[in-house]
Amino acid sequence: MDYHAFVVDAGGHVIGRHDLACDNDTEALELAAFLVRDNDIEVWQLGRVVGKLTHEHWPPQQGSAA
């Protein structure tokens, strides 16, 4: 299936697009995770939002073993 990962700036404007060929939503989100840098990423399939990855919360924090 065809997915698109849109790079979104702080003002909410799309500043880039990456086409992703993935089998499912999970795979698309995992692949899009590699694109998160200084901007947020929105993953879409056709007109459906699959998910949003925010650079401020990336990478996800791992729990610490205390």
Image: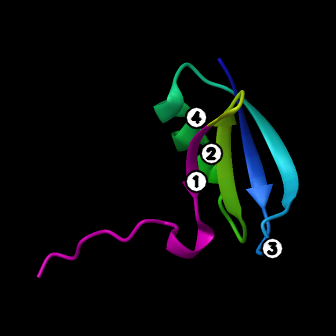
Give residue 5's position: percent from left, percent from top: 72, 43
The picture quadrant where one finds residue 64 is: bottom left
Q: Residue at x 78, y 66 (%)?
A: 12
Crowding around mark 2 (Cα neighbors within 10 Å: few <14, some 14 to 19, many 20+) is many
Marks 2 and 4 in Cβ contact (< 8 Å): yes
The residue singled out by tag 4 in the image is: 28
Marks 1 and 4 in Cβ contact (< 8 Å): no
Which residue is nearer to you in this view: 35 or 43? Answer: 43
Crowding around mark 3 (Cα neighbors within 10 Å: few <14, some 14 to 19, many 20+) is few
Instruction: Describe the element under mark 2 as helix, strand or loop.
Output: helix
Bounds of the magenta segment: 49-66
Which residue is nearer to you in this view: 4 or 61? Answer: 4
The residue singled out by tag 3 in the image is: 11
Q: Amino acid at mark 2?
A: Ala
Which residue is nearer to you in this view: 7 or 46? Answer: 46
Marks 2 and 1 in Cβ contact (< 8 Å): no
Q: Residue at x 84, y 63 (%)?
A: 13
Crowding around mark 1 (Cα neighbors within 10 Å: few <14, some 14 to 19, many 20+) is some
Please tell me the numbered disc located at residue 52: 1
Of the image marks 3 and 2, the number of the one nearer the N terminus: 3
The picture quadrant where one finds residue 50 is: top right
Crowding around mark 4 (Cα neighbors within 10 Å: few <14, some 14 to 19, many 20+) is many
Q: Amino acid at mark 1?
A: Lys
52 within the magenta span? yes
- What is the distance, in whole Å, between disc 3 and disc 2 at their CAs? 20 Å
Of the image marks 2 and 1, the number of the one nearer the N terminus: 2
Instruction: Describe the element under mark 4 as helix, strand or loop.
Output: helix
